[in-house]
Image (cartoon, rainbow, N blue to C red):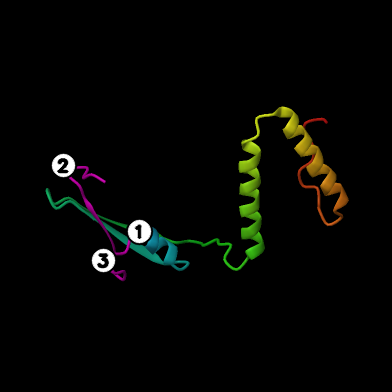
Amino acid sequence: MDCPACDSPITLEVGPEQPLSTSLPDALLTAEEDECIEITRNCWTCGWHEDRQIRVESIETTEGDEAAVERAVLLNEITDELSAIDSLATLKDTLAEVRRQRQLDPTTTDTNRDTTGE
């Protein structure tokens, strides 16, 4: 980041309860709900100074939900594999097989209805 007054590099400090070496992402990831994080930006060339505060209103996490994390990883892997397929026929065959497997599994609920008209 550069100083808005003189374009010199500025320092970013998170505190005052945090160690001087704490980065902003680390402070955000360790924050509790309703916690206020103070950030100070300083230019040591011209003396420009800015204080900011960020209040954490809510935290959403998948911590402890191993099934959700595993599902997200598998969906990413499937998406990566499918995006690497260039053949339209292969994609159509894959879609047909996925639909066939879903029909065979009675625990699967159909949340993605066929919108292609096939």
Residue under label 3, please give it. Answer: 20
Q: Of tags 3 and 2, which is closer to the observer? A: 3
Specify the quadrant that holds the C terminus.
top right
Residue under label 2, please give it. Answer: 6
Q: Nearer the viewer, residue 19 or 107?
A: 107
Query: Residue type at mark 2?
Result: Cys
Whichever of labels 2 and 1 marks the residue nearer the N terminus, that label is 2
State whether residue 46 is above or below residue 53: above
The majority secondary structure of the magenta stretch comes to: loop
Query: Residue type at mark 3?
Result: Leu
**Does residue 42 appear to the left or right of 14 in the view shown?**
left
Mark 1 element type:
helix
Separation of disc 2 and disc 1 at Cα?
Answer: 23 Å
What residue is rendered at 85% in x and 53% in y? 105
5 within the magenta span: yes
Query: Residue type at mark 1?
Result: Leu
Residue under label 1, please give it. Answer: 24
Residue 16, horizontal then vertical, whole percent: 28, 68
The answer to whether the residues at label 3 and label 2 have Cβ atoms under 8 Å apart is no
Residue 10, horizontal then vertical, whole percent: 21, 50
Residue 35, horizontal then vertical, whole percent: 42, 67
Residue 113, horizontal then vertical, whole percent: 79, 41
Separation of disc 3 and disc 2 at Cα?
Answer: 25 Å
**Does residue 101 appear to the left or right of 21 in the view shown?**
right
The answer to whether the residues at label 2 and label 1 have Cβ atoms under 8 Å apart is no
Mark 2 element type:
loop
Q: Callout 2: 10 Å neighbours few (<14), some, many (20+)?
A: few
Which residues lie in the magenta part? 1-24
Q: Callout 3: 10 Å neighbours few (<14), some, many (20+)?
A: few
